[in-house]
Amino acid sequence: MPELAKLGHIALETPDLEESVWFFRDVLGLNEVERTDDTVYFRGQVDFEHHSLSLTQAAESGVNHIAYRTESPKDVGQFADHFEANGVDVTWVDSGTEAGQGEAVRFTVPHGHQFEIYYDIEKVETPKETRSRLRNRMHKATSRVTPRHIDHVNILDRDAGETAAWLQDHLGFQLNEYFATPDDEYFRNWLTVATLPHDVAVGTTFVEEEPLERLHHVAYRVENIHHLFEAADELSENDIQIDGGPGQHAMTEGKFLYFRDPASDIRVELYTGGYPVFDPDWEPIRWTEDDAGVAGDHQWIGDTTDKMGRLGLTPYANW
Amino acid sequence: MPELAKLGHIALETPDLEESVWFFRDVLGLNEVERTDDTVYFRGQVDFEHHSLSLTQAAESGVNHIAYRTESPKDVGQFADHFEANGVDVTWVDSGTEAGQGEAVRFTVPHGHQFEIYYDIEKVETPKETRSRLRNRMHKATSRVTPRHIDHVNILDRDAGETAAWLQDHLGFQLNEYFATPDDEYFRNWLTVATLPHDVAVGTTFVEEEPLERLHHVAYRVENIHHLFEAADELSENDIQIDGGPGQHAMTEGKFLYFRDPASDIRVELYTGGYPVFDPDWEPIRWTEDDAGVAGDHQWIGDTTDKMGRLGLTPYANW
Amino acid sequence: MPELAKLGHIALETPDLEESVWFFRDVLGLNEVERTDDTVYFRGQVDFEHHSLSLTQAAESGVNHIAYRTESPKDVGQFADHFEANGVDVTWVDSGTEAGQGEAVRFTVPHGHQFEIYYDIEKVETPKETRSRLRNRMHKATSRVTPRHIDHVNILDRDAGETAAWLQDHLGFQLNEYFATPDDEYFRNWLTVATLPHDVAVGTTFVEEEPLERLHHVAYRVENIHHLFEAADELSENDIQIDGGPGQHAMTEGKFLYFRDPASDIRVELYTGGYPVFDPDWEPIRWTEDDAGVAGDHQWIGDTTDKMGRLGLTPYANW
Amino acid sequence: MPELAKLGHIALETPDLEESVWFFRDVLGLNEVERTDDTVYFRGQVDFEHHSLSLTQAAESGVNHIAYRTESPKDVGQFADHFEANGVDVTWVDSGTEAGQGEAVRFTVPHGHQFEIYYDIEKVETPKETRSRLRNRMHKATSRVTPRHIDHVNILDRDAGETAAWLQDHLGFQLNEYFATPDDEYFRNWLTVATLPHDVAVGTTFVEEEPLERLHHVAYRVENIHHLFEAADELSENDIQIDGGPGQHAMTEGKFLYFRDPASDIRVELYTGGYPVFDPDWEPIRWTEDDAGVAGDHQWIGDTTDKMGRLGLTPYANW
């Protein structure tokens, strides 16, 4: 069975590339790595490969794909074979289609999110002016926020439990935590291929008018809660609305701040804390309505399934 | 003209003294200094006098008085003379009525808040078991929260501008910041007798059914934002509801966390940050509706006078 | 090839068990899980298995063993077979020899450190009084320090490069960073079986009179730099000497505080920060004398091999 | 008796103005307010007057003067009269000699430090590009360090006790804390005219070859310990040596980081924490050799008078 190693990057589309670049590079402090005709590539301070985010000029905002890296080169083809054997269409992407990246395969997760799997990726040097004196950093801090690395994506669709099961069955994700409704629907799911509390979260949405393949947010890790406050302050000085937080999630125990790229309206989370999952016999943690309002989620409100359903779509999406 | 030196203490009443003691001492970490028949006295780590908070068993929750200390012994009598000359009733309180405290005078601020003025106060030693090895601390940290000292009180009444003017005229408070309505009513006011961004805040409330002399909250200073998160976590582990925050106020620039003593339902704020006011020619900072949603107040919502009016009374009282 | 999943625990020996228990439990805040005749077992807030530290009453201070958990049950026997095939003596330890733990094997790493390998380990419930309301914590915070989980051990011997190579060859460790002398000796080595910047560090010592199998320190992860300061304050209030820090290491980029258990004189580090290693093609980071005094290690002094040699043995062991 | 309100600014001289400007503005993040032929003026984020630091091109590094602001305009002349009546020479400085500042008087404190007293000072607006959206900030954060305001100066001379007494007698300083030798010499003194733990520290030096009027350091306040670490990191990325810290002082209970302007070699401290002194009957805190190594000063070492003497001059000047 092939294996995934990590969340690699997310490819976003924005109607105003320059404003999005300003937001992710100048306000948040991601490092611009490379720029092609219509796409700019970024990484955080300890994203050790070519990029963890790309922004492409497009007619509308959206997610082009979410990319996971495999444990070895041969895993890419093996995943492709596995999907084809299971009736999942795959598309091969040529080397160089994405800057710095080799051959990759793309496919669609149930309910519409497009994922990508790759192994080959450049380890590009940092230009001298932003290089760190520390050999274990890709660049020095260039903002008060200093995003460290891509941490996770949070996606919504019509049946989160089904998608979460699919991710476990076909991609080898481990389910770390979930929230179950009284009918035992897996309403919120936190999964990982690495040792994070999650590198993907999958939640159910009830809202008809929203595209079902919606990205709730992409999250970058910051070092500690202070960076959440520095970010909130920096965003406010730039007249960018805070969407939620600072606060602490009950699930995954992470601390967070939510806001949106003003150009694309795509939501970003800064995330810190949480716990590492090193134990090979991890048993998924089950949360239920009884835990609503529980210790630790200083923002988490809602005590009915109905409220849960709406949470993912309110401006304060406290997950 | 007599002068005030500092906010000294607040005397609260609670229907369940032991639960309130548990909350302020065991959860928050205030130091119990002395206990009489019906009253327990507390102070923070760098409250250098006898106490900054007293809790008295009573039929109902309430504020007995808010006490300010004068610059010199003679100021107490001079304030009493001043009030009598201005038609304000004063009541002399005998030495020892409050543990550790000498003679004091009490009087009522317009709209009903009872204030006290005193100078003589004991500097009681800390028992060995909670004494710090640092000579500039009254006791070592006994919780994760470690309240440092009483910082301010926030009071509400029918006409905050009138009360704020009275505090300036009769007690020598300095107005540091205020929020003015389009009709130039001083709707929110932050004043100090020391060098804090405020040691009293006065706000207007429109709600008929609430007692007009309401205490919105009493605030203790903590060292930094980490203590806000540690407090939120500790409260949550003890099943005590967070009322608002962590966040940052635009006015006074302080960071905050709000919650309530479960026994008395009295609201407490932990507060950190802000700026010192050392300049003798400080000009009050004017905020208006144009600043609503302004940078830095990550919780501050509301763009109409009506919303302003309700803010002080909602569960999330983001001031 | 069998695989290791994580650093599991360290078994320490102390001449004064009760004082060591006071130190690790009451000062640092580790959770006491179980107590047998001569041994007490502890874990951190997110150590999800039975224990990550044991203290045993003994004539002298020392390290009994350092234990790593395997990825699967069968890996334990496979490692035993591998060692026997390679002339390394292994000793089988019966289930229950260590509380909560199944069968294990022990063996000696070159230069004398005793390691243990196990898979079966209980997931013991936390007693109600210290249980957290969060389902992803093993216990609530019981101190200002709140150690989160065992992070790494740092061991010293006569030829660190040789030991580091052995750990890679026989146990599958990945070398993340190393410091090389002008003669290309691998003088300091940071290795992991998980995704940490290191779960074991191996350094060369030149000092004859020290036992070569010396433990430099065992490290617990804390959430952020604030906990380093809270720990320093708590230690100081308890008259326990700070050994080094707070500061930041250049290597592994972690922030640290060093001190010693007053009963056993064993050094403990609190550690936070660092970076995760998710990339399967990680290339070890090489540091040399040119990096001495480099950015980020605010405590790191020394620019000659000789000084390097002494660093690991001075009271301020700034690694 | 005239009164001082606050430490206003320090006027430094540097042999390389542009490099010093780079250091204080671009590395530390002070705000450049005005520039004349040979002098550049700076302030912190909540320094509400024209400047708190000036740098003047000069042949050698040095302190031109340390300036305190009075409580009222007439205090300036009254201090001048007082000094003349007591045989202390005063020099009147014309309005405009220092940018933004009115008439002032200068005089020499025993052992040679030049002080200045002024009242009139402009409140200059911040240019739009660095203006904050918060009305209670002079500028938005322009670095990861964000110095808040000038906090204190630390000066050394041959007999600190004598100077400290002079500052109390002639300028109305309050002695908050002091360290006394076995011979009851006031070896280290922390004094304030405001409510800080100190706005001036005076220490004895024994070293003959050093100029006796030496400035040990000027300190800027930062918001919390995180800013100390951010500063240490920023300095290191710019190859600027850390002089001491991060750590916590026993005296004044402040947290600190020391380093030097590479152009002038003048030492700067970033300082956070400490306690406010609001009580009018403050009794100076006495520290003696018995407190050496005391709780809370994680850097403070030394248990003999001789060591005390050397501390102020070592590279790690842990005061």
Image: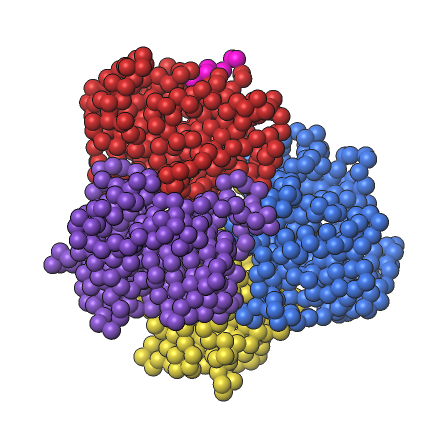
Chain colours: A purple, B yellow, C red, D blue
Image vertical order of residue C257 relative to residue B87, above or below: above
- Prevailing secondary structure class for the magenta stretch in the rendered image: loop
Q: Is B271 on the left or on the right of B38, as rendered?
A: right
Q: Can you see residue A231?
A: no
Where is residue B59? Give x, y as percent.
Answer: 29, 65
Assign the N terminus of chain A to one quadrant of the image: top left
In-front residue for pair C163/B263? C163
Where is residue C238? Give x, y as percent.
Answer: 46, 34
Q: Which residues are magenta?
A: C208-216
Q: Can you see residue D46?
A: yes
Q: Quick check: is D128 in the magenta stretch?
A: no
Q: Is A162 on the left or on the right of A105, as rendered?
A: left
In-front residue for pair B82/D244? D244
Where is residue D282? Give x, y as percent.
Answer: 60, 52
Assign the C terminus of chain A to one quadrant of the image: bottom left
In-front residue for pair A202/D160? A202
Image vertical order of residue C169 relative to residue C31, above or below: above
Q: Quick check: is C210 in the magenta stretch?
A: yes
Residue under the point 44% across and 53% down: A99
In-front residue for pair C53/A35? A35
Residue under the point 51% across and 64% down: A22
Q: Is D125 on the left or on the right of B219, as rendered?
A: right
Q: Is C312 on the left or on the right of D17, as rendered?
A: left
Residue under the point 61% across and 67% down: D130
Count of residue discs = 0
Q: Quadrant of residue B175?
A: bottom right
Residue sitting farthest toward the bottom: B183
Residue under the point 45% across and 41% down: C274
Residue sitting farthest toward the front: A94
Where is residue A191? Give x, y as percent.
Answer: 26, 49
